[in-house]
Image (tube, rainbow, N blue to C red):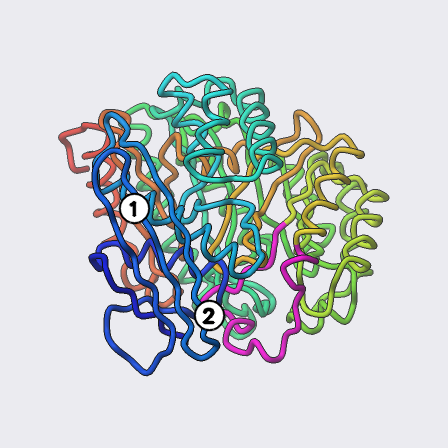
């Protein structure tokens, strides 16, 4: 890890500096300590109106010195500290863009969902043009990304016209933490299901109890459920009998079952689906499933630990169509090991033949704890320029094929500082994906690794409540988590009863 010694400014601002530096260099730590480093960053602040920041970067090894400045007028309603942070970030962004020649597509935006920020600005009464200017001047986001955000927000409001008025409803996320194998890039709760027969049954017992308890709370307070999403892991890793029992429990527990707008099952691994499971999903009125190839290159699937073939993906997709599944999502990942523009172009050609209702295009992220992050030397991935080219290819392909972008999110350590985008044919957007990304209502997480995002319709306050990720820990503690989660829900919704 490289260390950059920072002088001239309080450590309160180090994290913001580190976020910007991290866009350009891997494994960088900002510190005030004198260490064995020849890299220094000096920040000189002139307070007043405007606030002025000059940053000087010195590399003693090369003898290079680089400088950049930024000035910001103090805005009404924004604290001096916040304005200073923004000015420091802008100065650092300019300095490292000049130093490296790399222009960051998302400017200084880190740690925030861009579309969520758009919604917030619109709710504050800003016009579309004012929102655009905010992204240009406050955040230095490039025009093509701003255009993408505009399209997405417009599409979201078409798919969910009452998006801003769903805070008295909830959605449910059901986490089933088992997969046939674990992929090299994955950090989701995903445990190989082989040899876990006992813990699978024990886990499902706890999950049934959790569904019943939350269903009782929803019924008691007459709170409708907007969407239900079964994820994981791969929920279709469990048996047909186990899955049917889960649907029976959900229907029995949720009094608003017939009013649920969307039921999704993340059947991401084609090697977990067969005719019996697809028939079950169809019989229970599942609105949307995912069959995720990630890549159509056999060598890549083996390298990343998918353990299914391209042929299996295609056969499963066609079987799902024959069984009457009408809304299928497929995922592709940009920047998988040993894949570049040619391979991604071939994947898009295959998507053109298949025409799923939605295509989610992820840009590879080196997630902490994944095998790929721990063994980077084993996995040769695309550089920043090639990654950006593939992101553009996906967007151009979607326009050509009449898919619309409807949700977007970004992650730490994502290749090229790009983004993940969900595209769909108009009218086939995942409502759950919009709700989870824009955080306009509470999402109650049930099961292993499920995170509840509890949003108070009274105060707008936000509480994150995670269930244990490991099945055995969940089995041992789910009753405690049920009780504590209901307490948090009561507080958020203004109910005095703790039951």
Q: Is residue 447 visible?
A: no
Q: Which residues are magenta?
A: 362-387
Relative to 163, say whether 377 is above or below. below
* Residue 64: assigned label: 2
The answer to which of 92 and 20 lies nearer the viewer is 92
Q: Based on the displayed image, in which of its 4 quarters is residue 119 positioned?
A: top left
Camera-side mark, 1 or 2: 2
The one of 101 and 489 positioned closer to us in this rendering: 101
In this rendering, position of residue 120 left or right of residue 230: left
Q: Could you say which quadrant of the image residue 295 lies in?
A: bottom right
Q: Position of residue 78 (x, y in %)?
A: 25, 32
Q: Where does the C terminus fall, quadrant-wise? A: top left
Q: Which residue is mark 1?
A: 85
Residue ranking furthest to the bottom: 36
Examine the structure image and report whether residue 260 is included in the region drawn in magenta. Answer: no
Give residue 345's position: percent from left, percent from top. Answer: 81, 53
Towards the viewer: 268 or 62: 62
| Nearer-N-terminus badge (1/2) | 2
Q: Quadrant of the N terminus?
A: bottom left
Q: Which residue is found at the position 49% from the left and 23% from the top?
A: 259
The residue shown at (35%, 25%) is 167
């Amino acid at each position: 890890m490289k260390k950059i010694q920072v002088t001239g400014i309080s450590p309160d601002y180090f994290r913001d500096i580190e976020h910007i530096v991290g866009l350009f260099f891997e494994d960088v730590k900002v510190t005030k300590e004198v260490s064995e480093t020849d890299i220094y960053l000096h920040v000189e602040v002139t307070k007043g109106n405007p606030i002025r920041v000059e940053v000087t970067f010195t590399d003693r090894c090369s003898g290079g010195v680089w400088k950049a400045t930024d000035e910001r007028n103090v805005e009404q309603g924004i604290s001096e500290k916040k304005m200073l942070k923004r000015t420091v970030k802008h100065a650092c962004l300019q300095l490292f863009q000049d130093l490296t020649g790399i222009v960051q597509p998302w400017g200084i935006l880190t740690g925030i969902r861009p579309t969520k920020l758009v919604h917030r600005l619109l709710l504050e009464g800003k016009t579309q043009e004012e929102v655009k200017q905010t992204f240009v001047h406050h955040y230095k986001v490039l025009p093509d990304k701003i255009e993408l955000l505009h399209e997405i927000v417009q599409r979201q409001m078409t798919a969910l016209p009452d998006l801003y008025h769903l805070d008295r409803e909830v959605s449910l996320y059901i986490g089933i933490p088992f997969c046939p194998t674990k992929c090299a890039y994955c950090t989701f709760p995903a445990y190989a299901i082989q040899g876990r027969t006992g813990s699978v049954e024990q886990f499902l017992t706890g999950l049934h109890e959790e569904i019943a308890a939350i269903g009782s709370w929803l019924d008691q307070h007459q709170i409708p459920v907007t969407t239900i999403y079964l994820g994981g892991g791969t929920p279709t890793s469990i048996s047909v009998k186990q899955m049917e029992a889960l649907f029976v429990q959900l229907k029995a527990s949720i009094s608003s079952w017939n009013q649920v707008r969307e039921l999704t099952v993340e059947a991401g691994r084609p090697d977990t689906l067969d005719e019996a499971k697809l028939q079950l999903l169809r019989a229970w009125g599942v609105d949307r499933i995912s069959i995720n190839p990630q890549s159509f290159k056999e060598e890549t699937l083996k390298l990343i630990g998918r353990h299914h073939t391209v042929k299996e993906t295609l056969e499963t997709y066609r079987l799902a169509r024959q069984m009457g599944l009408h809304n299928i999502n497929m995922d592709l990942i940009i920047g998988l090991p040993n894949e570049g523009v040619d391979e991604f172009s071939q994947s898009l050609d295959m998507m053109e033949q298949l025409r799923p209702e939605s295509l989610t295009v992820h840009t590879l992220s080196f997630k902490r704890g994944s095998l790929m992050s721990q063994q980077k030397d084993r996995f040769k991935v695309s550089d920043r320029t090639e990654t950006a080219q593939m992101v553009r290819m996906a967007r151009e392909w979607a326009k050509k094929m009449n898919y619309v972008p409807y949700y977007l999110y970004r992650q730490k350590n994502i290749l090229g500082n790009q983004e993940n985008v969900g595209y769909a044919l108009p009218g086939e957007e995942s409502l759950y994906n919009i709700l989870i990304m824009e955080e306009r209502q509470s999402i109650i997480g049930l099961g292993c690794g499920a995170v509840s995002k509890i949003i108070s319709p009274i105060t707008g306050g936000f509480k994150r409540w995670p269930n244990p990720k490991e099945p055995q820990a969940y089995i041992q503690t789910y009753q405690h988590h049920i009780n504590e989660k209901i307490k948090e829900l009561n507080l958020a919704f203004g109910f005095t009863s703790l039951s």
